[in-house]
Each structure stands twice: as structure tokens, then as C-alpha cells.
Image: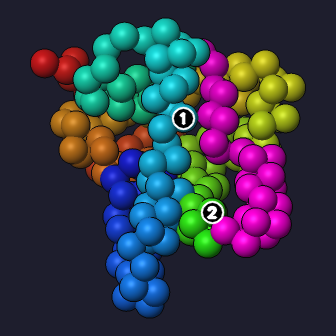
Amino acid sequence: MSPGGHLLTTTAACAISAALTGSFPFTAAIAVGGFLIDVDHALDYVLVERQRDLRPAAFLRYYMERRPRRTVLLLHSYELFAILIALAWWLQAPLLWGYLLGGFLHLGLDLRFNGEATPRSIGAFYSFAYRLAHRFDARALLGDGIPAIPRTFWATFFAEFSTAGRSRRAREPLPPPT
């Protein structure tokens, strides 16, 4: 799912949480799990891919054009979620449950929407062990098709991509960031 899609769905989940629980900390934990879980993309971008252009448009374009060579994504893994579930249950930690709720929303949407643009098994992709077995090789894990993406940052931020790996809304590449 696009970053904008995650932002909108997480905002909706947070609004529901705030209305039902009245708990700002619990609602913030949902926001962290639902949207800020993608910080692992930024960590991969800087630490694994050694990219130094930190402008949001350059970062977004790098991922949307499927340029990463390695895909570690530590926070996007079933194994981490299993550990966190055990911890949340053992510690009876409401904030950790909030994070997990947001994270389940995020991963569920990723599984549903990213699978349409990925020729490999999207279900297996979210296993850290599976990615490790493939040595985090992005091409082996995700294929090498490059979708056309919208021309502007915001259109790309909210873009959805079809099964054929083509943008539903635009067919032109994103221009270089200014």
C-alpha cells in the first residue's frame, strides 16, 4: 500500500481508538504501529543501501521505482510480531497492544495491496527468515518489474499500483527531485 494509504487508514484507526478509549497514549501507539512502522524503510535506505539523499521525494522515488538492492525491513516481519505478542501478553502492556493493532492494520494492508504489484509470494515476503534465506536480495524477493509512477510527489505518495505493476492513475515517471 502507498504511504498515503497507510496514513489515511492509520488516521481513521486512531480516530476510532480516541473515540472508543479516550486514551491518547494507546491511540499514539496505534499510530506508531500503523504508520511509523515504515521507519525501517528509512533505515534500510540509509544503512543498507547507503543512500544519502534524504529529501522525501528522492526517498519515495527510490522505493517506488524498486531500486533497492537489499530489503531487510526488520519491523515488517511475522517473527518480530510473534515476539511482541508474547511480550504484550506476558507484560500485560496496553501500549504494546496498541502498537500491535496498528502494525496488524499496516501488514494486513501491505499483504492485500502490495501483492498485486509483486510477482512473488507476498505472504512469504513478510517473514524475516524468508528474506534472510534469500539474502535480502530485493530482485529475488520482489521481482524486477518497475511500475510507472505519477509525476508529482503527492500523487506518488497516495498512488496505488495494479497487478501489472502499472500505476492506475499515471503512466509517466516521477521527475528528479528539485
Which mark is on residue 86? none
| Part of the protein shown in magenta | 69-93
Q: Which residue is mark 2?
A: 96
Give the residue at the far front of this rendering.
Answer: 91
- Bin the neighbour count of mark 2 within 10 Å (Cα to Cα): few under 14, some 14-19, many 20 and up: many
Tell me residue 68's x, y (percent).
54, 19
Number of the label disc, if any, that sits on residue 40 = 1
Is residue 146 shown left or right of residue 123?
A: left
Q: Position of residue 113 (x, y in %)?
A: 55, 56
Q: What is the quadrant of residue 25 in the picture?
A: bottom left
**What's the residue at 74%, 56% (across, down)?**
84
Nearer the observer, 111 or 39: 39
Q: Measure how far apart labels 1 and 2 are at the Cα level.
A: 18 Å
Residue 49 in sight: yes
Q: Is residue 139 left or right of residue 35?
A: right
Of residues 17 and 92, the one drawn nearer to the viewer in this rendering: 92
The residue sitting at 40% across, 23% down in the picture is 62
Mark 1 vs mark 2, foreground winner is: 2
By what rule are the colours in the image chosen?
rainbow
Q: Residues within 10 Å of mark 1 (few under 14, many from 20)?
A: some
Q: Residue at x 22, y 18 (%)?
A: 176
Quadrant including the C terminus: top left
Look at the image and say whether residue 31 sits in the magenta stretch. Answer: no
